[in-house]
Image (tube, grey):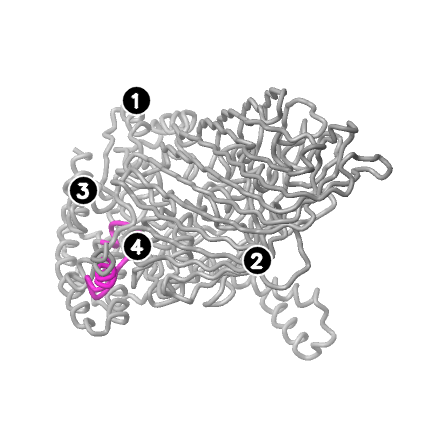
Amino acid sequence: MHKPFAVAALLAASCGAQAATDNDLAAIRGQIDEMKKSYEQRIAALEQKLVQAEAQAKSSPPPVPPAPAPVAESRPVAAATPASGFNPEVSLILQGQYKDMKNVAERGITGFVPAGGHDHGSGTIEGINKRGFSLDHTELVFAANIDPYWRGQAIIAALDGQAEVEEAWFQSLGIGQGIGLKAGRFRSGIGYLNEQHPHMWDFADAPLMYQAMFGTEGGYAQDGVQLKWLAPTPVFLEFGAEFGRGANFPGSDRNKNGSGAGALFAHVGDDLGIAHSWRAGLSYLKTSAREREAHFEDTVNGVEALSKFTGDSTTWLADFVWKWAPNGNPKYQNFKFQSEYFLRSEKGDLSCGEAEAGVAVSCQDITSGYRTRQSGWYTQGVYQFTPNWRAGLRYEQLDSGTRDLGENGNYLAVDHYKPKKTTAMIDYSWSEFSRLRLQFAQDKSMQGITDNQVTMQYIMSLGAHGAHKF
Amino acid sequence: MSKLFPTLLLTLASLPAWANLNVFATVPEWASLAREIGGDKVRVYSATNAFQDPHRIEAKPSLLAQARQANLVVAAGADLEIGWLPLVLRDSGNAAIQAGRPGYFEAANFVSRLEVPTSVDRAQGDIHAAGNPHLHLDPRNVLKVGEALAGRMAELDAANAAAYQAGYKSFAGKWQAAMARWEKEAAPLRGVPVLVHHASFLYLANWLGLKEVGTLEPKPGIEPTSGHLSSLLARQQTLPAKMVLRTAYNPDGPSQWIAGKTGLPAVLLPYTVGGTAEAKDLFGLFDDTVQRLLKGLR
């Protein structure tokens, strides 16, 4: 059967290794793997028979007490753990939606500078804000232990015509003393929702607060280093610090040495009885922008002006999560409450110029001080009332707060607004790996517009059984 | 305030000194076994209780805090804890308990596993590539795991090696006597056909000779559907079962439904230590399991 062929192939490969192409080698490997698999299966089957035979032998004459089994009799069968059997762990997330909402030319959040810079799309922002049927990012995840000291993970998001490296990092396994080191591109540990990818969200879109802070991706990621320390206390107490490139909003890519952005966070958490668990966190993110672009309406000439911000951006985040499950068994029923608050201050200079060549603006070449202080929060609850069904409610509100544009403020329209949004969702999960969600939202994030949105979304995960964070 | 800080430091410093070996067991049965072997030389923390489905636990902050200080993690293995334990281990910042280190112990590696699938496809439900992980319900497996665990505890805490070996010996002696008793008592159960909620009792059935004729879950990990329960009811004509078994963490609805339609006794088994008031330790677990099965048969 396979054996002579594989042996011959091996011989051939070892004699004239230079002649063997990669395809041949792959074929041989395949054969060997198949052989291995078939033998492993046979061994497993034999083991099973043996156990059954033992059981019968032992208990067919019931009243006879079995002789005390010598302790060394049964040799342990140490089998490979599946994690190394499927090395690396691969999984693929399929996510798509149907969305019904108003056609708004330039979707944004009134009173907040859009994270995507200046986007002159035809009313469709990439990804989550498309109308009609659309495919979200298709995420491909590879993860594996690299060696006893390191673990690696990459998340590639495929979109039409491009693939984006969402995360690609390695993490320490062997430092000890509660220290964890992560380096590469990663979602920052600030806030609660920030580390979670869209397929883990309880709603079809990120809270307004995250969209205002970091854009529609709903999270802050950067290239850099993260250091965490878990205190040796009975209560969960974790501290983290990050340094990185800081290329993403609210910062911008700057051609410089050293760290472009820094973050600090602390988490504390514990159980209350068997049924309740909670975690609270406080985070701080400091980054800088150079010539970060945004659009303002020129109130004098009635045209659009392009502004460029250079300065520092500081964000504070507070988060709280509380989970309840009867007896601490979340499979059948559970409730999750979460809430986050942010406060962002930006300070620097804003220079004004033409948005389109030849369209004169009244604030041309004026550079003046820029100072903002904006905040927002969301709060949500999700109740799983049967193993398959969950329902959730989210309310959120932002405050455009202080927006001081100095002299430029005389020429530009500076909106002051309190965006609000209420969202309700219900989802059905056939298993842990498939979910269909229906969501209704009343979105008042744009001044003067009440947008009633209906979203039907599916999330399917194929492959490795990824563990999710608390 | 000036007093608080030194007090805190002292508290912190004294924490790991509570016992010689800090054991983090994922499930109550192995926590109980570690206590039997380690006695007062170990501090044992059980990550779950008998009312929690060990497949579906979250990587809670409290688990991270406990794993941080553990010298030894005792897991069931065979992917039972795959949804949460790998994350807890990685985020604990504790090098000693990572997979492959002596501080990481998987019970499933020391017994012959049953129901090892020949192919793994999610269309079959949440099946475990390494076989059925509910292996502690065969007391012979408990003995094998105990022997290996005592060895591992002795390796990690050499100063108390003799105590662990002695602890195991004394446990094994009592266990073998108890096993003989259980096997004798359970003789009438041989060949009895049963329905089970989830494939949690495979090893128990294998040991006692119970005949598992169906599961209430249509596929492992998928909750019972009315269609599937009806088909089990229809099967009852041709392949009659004598009782319906479930664990303490399974909901009782589906079992009771079958029981109501057929008159079969719906039997709750403790499944693990703490599952019933009687199952206070491993001995109580098997005492009570056998008693409840015999009662169901009457």
Q: Is residue A228 visible?
A: yes
Q: Where in the figure is residue A366, as x and y percent of width and height?
A: 74, 42
The residue sitting at the bottom extreme is A15
Same chain, labels 2 and 4: no
Q: Nearer the viewer, mark 3 or mark 1?
A: 1
- Report the amino acid beneath label 4: Gln
| Location of residue B166 with respect to A422 vertically, above or below | below
Give the magenta part as a residue range. Answer: B8-31
Residue A171 position in % (x across, y down):
49, 61
Name the dominant secondary structure of the magenta segment.
helix
* Residue B193 can be seen in this image: no
Image quarter of residue B23: bottom left
In the rendered image, residues at marks 3 and 1 fall on the same chain:
yes
The quadrant in which the N terminus of chain B is found is: bottom left
Q: Distance between the residues labelled 2 and 1?
A: 64 Å
- The disc at residue B66 is 4
Dot 3 lies on which element?
helix
Label drawn at residue B188: 3
Is B186 left, or right, of A374 in this rendering? left
Q: Give the vertical position of A459 relative to B186 (above or below).
A: above
Q: Which mark is residue A244?
A: 2
Residue under label 1, please give it: B261
Query: Callout 1: residue from which chain?
Result: B
Q: How far apart are marks 4 and 3 (CA)?
A: 44 Å
